[in-house]
Amino acid sequence: MFLLCILAALAETRWTTEAVEGVRWLDSSVVTLKLDANAEVELLAVDGEKARVVANATFGWIDAAKLTDVAPPKPTDPVPGMPTGMPPGMPLRLPGQ
């Protein structure tokens, strides 16, 4: 348990770039993680092309190329280049009005 606390303290937050499955050990085919795109994980270690991550208290090895350190936009974040609101005084018209 002490080792897990140390690993968690050194972990770095990453996000998946696409849906990915993680296996228990590098030489294993036992799937322990199934993550959606943009899932937040903690990166614990990298071994070649594989990354050891933890998500929701479950550990696994995934393809390191499917991780990014750039957080996905939040649903409330405005889309770049799109207006963020209506100009003052502009009436709101609903369809059919």
Image (spheres, rainbow, N blue to C red):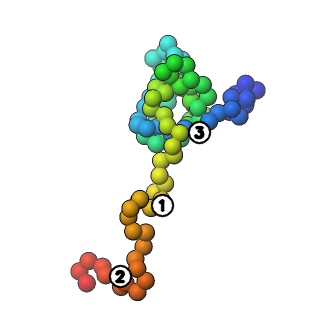
Label 3: state its secondary structure.
Answer: strand
Single out the residue that lies furthest toward the top. Answer: 27
Asked whether residue 42 is in view, the answer is: yes
Q: Which mark is residue 13?
A: 3
Q: Residue furthest left?
A: 96
The kind of residue tagged 1 is Thr
**29 left or right of 8?**
left
Number of residues whose C-alpha sits closer than 10 Å to that of mark 2, classed few (under 14), some (14–19) or many (20 or more): few
Residue under the image location 71 percent in, 34 percent down? 9
First of labels 1, 2 by sequence position:
1
Depth check, front residue: 54 or 46: 46
Q: The residue under label 3 is which amino acid type? A: Thr
Looking at the image, which residue is at 51% across and 18% down?
Answer: 48
Asked whether the residues under the numbered discs 1 and 2 touch, taking CB atoms below 8 Å apart as contact, a structural biologist would say no
Task: Tell which of 95 and 44 is nearer to you.
Answer: 44
For the C terminus, which image quadrant?
A: bottom left
x 38%, y 62%: residue: 81
Against 19, is 51 above or below?
Answer: above
Q: Tag 1: Cα neighbours inside 10 Å, few (<14), some, or many (≥20)?
A: few
| Residue 84 x, y percent position in the rendering | 43, 69
The mark tally for this picture is 3
Please name the residue shown 48% across and 34% down the image.
67
Neighbourhood count class around disc 3 (C-alpha, 10 Å): few under 14, some 14–19, many 20 upward: some
Kindly state the secondary structure of the residue where label 2 is placed.
Answer: loop
Tell me the residue that label 2 is attached to: 92
User: Residue 29, how many percent across, how many down?
Assistant: 45, 17
> In the figure, residue 47 lies in which quadrant?
top right
Residue pointed to by mark 1: 76
Query: At which x and y percent is residue 20?
Result: 43, 31
Q: For this rendering, which residue is in front, 79 or 27? A: 79
